[in-house]
Amino acid sequence: MIDEIIRTKELNAYCYKIAGRMGDDLFQQTILEILENKTGIKKADSKMAYAKRTAFFLFINPNTSFGKLYRPKEIDIQRCLKSMYENTDDDFTHVFEYLNQPPKDKREWFEKTMFKLYMEMENASCRKLSSLIDINHTTISQTIQRFKTKANKYKTSQT
């Protein structure tokens, strides 16, 4: 199972794409994480998509083994998301298309603005964003969920 992922070199190329010169370290940490948590990959429909999600999580989260050792101070989340899903069936371009659509009303503008702020944070957390902009964290969380729901509806309306 893991041999197949290593042999294709797709994960290795993906790690270099999102982590740059630290791609080899990210690749090794990803393989180690997958080997330590075997139940996750066994349950996954697409083994490569699972491996890429694991690598992405290790890269953006500062509390992981990779994050603690190698994480750069600034990460381009949008670039990482685009590179993560370019070779899989999962497609998140609809999120960016929906985000770039002009808002229809003030509520939609607020949802898009909150989502942008949330994604641009170094350690994305509703509580941290709440303390920065002085809006209740529950409101931010619900707003981000509404944005995600609307972005998914936008995707289904486009197909």
Image: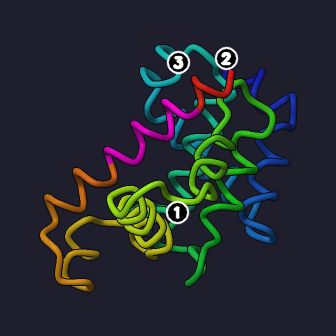
Q: Residue at x 86, y 37 (%)?
A: 9
The residue lying toward the viewer, choosing from 85 and 141, is 141
* Quadrant in which residue 133 is drawn: bottom left
Point out residue 45 in the picture as x, y percentages from the top left corner.
57, 14
Query: Are dots 3 and 2 in contact, CB under 8 Å?
Result: no
> Where residue 17 sits: x, y (%)?
81, 58
- Whether residue 24 sits left or right of residue 54 in the image: it is right
Disc 3 element: loop
Secondary structure found at label 2: loop
The residues tagged by marks 1 and 2 sit, at their Cα atoms, a distance apart of 25 Å
Q: Residue at x 59, y 48 (%)?
A: 98
Find the magenta span and give its range: 145-154
Task: Report, in whole angstroms, how far the alpha carbon at label 3 lies from the one at label 1.
Answer: 21 Å
Place of residue 150 in the rendered image (x, y in percent of width and height, measured from the top left): 43, 39
Q: What is the three-letter code of the residue carrying label 1?
A: Ile
Which numbered disc covers residue 60?
1
Q: Look at mark 3 in the image and give the residue it sits on.
A: 44
Q: Quadrant of the C terminus?
A: top right
Which residue does the image show at 44% across and 75% down from the upper left? Answer: 121
Q: CA distance from mark 3 to mark 2?
A: 11 Å
Q: How is the image coloured?
A: rainbow
Q: Which residue is mark 2?
A: 1
152 in magenta: yes
Question: Which dot, 1 or 2, sits closer to the camera?
Answer: 1
Where's the N terminus, which quadrant? Answer: top right
Residue 11 covered by magenta stretch: no
- In the displayed structure, 94 sits above or below 23; it is above
Q: Are discs 1 and 2 less than 8 Å apart at CB?
A: no
In the image, taking residue 31 as reference, residue 107 lies left or right, namely: left
